[in-house]
Image (cartoon, rainbow, N blue to C red):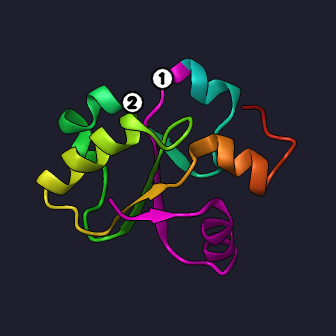
Amino acid sequence: MKEISATDLKQRLDSGEDIQIIDVRAPNEYEVAHLENSKLIPHSEIGSRVTEMDPARETVVYCQKGGWRSAEAIAALQRAGFDRVLNLKGGITAWSDEVDPSMSK
């Protein structure tokens, strides 16, 4: 599974790169904190909602700590033909630690 650090993702977003960001946590977690312009698709729904995402775009998937939920979602996306998928290393926790300390974890 390929990964991207929170710092690298922030730099790429700031430079205007077109990156599709998918949050695979639960809705209540998304309400507490999420990345701007991210789309909430809980990991258990990825397979049934794959048509809501563009396989031609680079996609970054994240969960709380970059663990099993994002790994399962990435595997499902790859089976569906997505080949430009990255895991946000450390998830929303890393984003809060490295990029935006004011963000809730």
Residue 72 image-quadrant placement = top left
Query: What range of the chain is rendered magenta?
Result: 1-27
| Mark number displayed over residue 26 | 1
What residue sits 48% from the left and 67% below the top?
Answer: 19
Q: Which mark is residue 42?
A: 2
Figure check: 15 above or below 47? below
Position of the C terminus, as image quadrant, is top right
At which x and y percent is residue 101?
Answer: 85, 46
Percent across and percent down for residue 75 are 22, 48
Label for residue 58?
none
Which image quadrant: the N terminus? Answer: bottom left
Query: What amino acid does circle 2 point to?
Result: Pro
Task: Look at 34% across and 32% down and name the residue there.
Answer: 43
Report x, y in % for residue 58.
38, 69
Q: Are marks 1 and 2 in contact (CB under 8 Å)?
A: yes
The residue under the point 79% across, 39% down is 103
Which residue occupies the extreme top position in the image? 28
Q: Residue at x 38, y 34 (%)?
A: 69
Q: Is residue 16 left or right of residue 70?
A: right
- Marks 1/2: CA distance? 6 Å
**Looking at numbered disc 1 in the image, what kind of residue is underneath it?**
Ala
